[in-house]
Image (spheres, grey):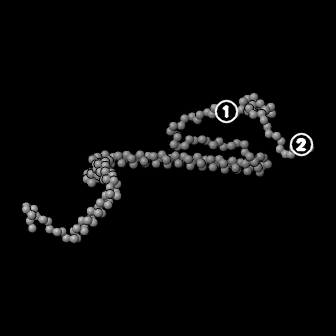
Amino acid sequence: MELGDREVPAAKPDIEVEWGAFLQETVGTALSSYGWFILLGCILLYLVKQRFSDNISSLLTSTPRSTEDPDEVVRRQEAVAAARLKMQEELNAQAERFKEKQKQLEEEKRRQKIESWESMKEGKSYRVATRVPQPQEPSPSTSASSAAPKPKPDRRSLRGGGYNPLTGDGGGTCAWRPGRRGPSAGG
């Protein structure tokens, strides 16, 4: 059938009509309920893509990152290994010195115990008057920057020189004292 120059479309099957109505209703409901969220999500995805597009493209293309000379890399690794070996040797030497000092201190303590035991057997005082001075050696981490130990400044007393607890002077501004505990003396 023709009406003038136009053709009348043929009737669509019922399945296509139902599917189109279903699709239109579903999409329309989703857009009306979540339209702003979908729009904001699309904008956010676009911004994230713009921000990280360089990083993503560099990850996708596998170009070698370093163009260094392999000999230079080997030299640098050997230098690091040599420095580690040197530091380990220094640490071992410090440990040996510490062990020797510990042995000397233990030997001195043992000798003092023997002396005190012998003096106690003879009836003398069992305490030996001579004490082993413990040498203070700075820790290995501060040994490079250690100087002579600083002398302690003269200590001042916490109270003034004229304080006497029996006179009550200088004890503060409060002069009230609580009364005696116990029953009153009236009677």
Q: Amino acid at mark 2?
A: Ala
Disc number at residue 112? none
- Which amino acid, mark 1? Arg
Between 115 and 167, the one lying in front of the other is 167
* Residue 166 visible somewhere in the drawing: yes
Where does label 2 land, which residue? 185
Residue 127, placed above or below residue 5: above
Find numbered disc 1 in the image and state the secondary structure of the residue it sits on. Answer: loop
Comparing 167 with 5, the one in front is: 5
Farthest-out residue, left: 5
For label 2, the crowd category at 10 Å Cα-Cα, with few meaning under 14, some 14 to 19 and many 20 or more, is few
In the displayed orientation, state which residue is furthest to the top: 162
Q: Quadrant of the N terminus?
A: bottom left
Locate residue 46, reporting x and y percent: 29, 51
The residue depicted at 56 percent of the width and 47 percent of the height is 98
Q: Which residue is pictured at 63% across the width and 43% down the height?
A: 134
How far across and down, in percent of the image, does residue 96 sit? Answer: 53, 48
Residue at image position (68%, 31%) is: 156
Tell me the CA gap for discs 1 and 2.
Answer: 48 Å
Q: Is residue 86 above or below residue 35?
A: above
Callout 1: 10 Å neighbours few (<14), some, many (20+)?
few
Q: Give 137 or 123, whichever is nearer the viewer.
A: 137
Residue 131 position in % (x across, y down): 68, 43
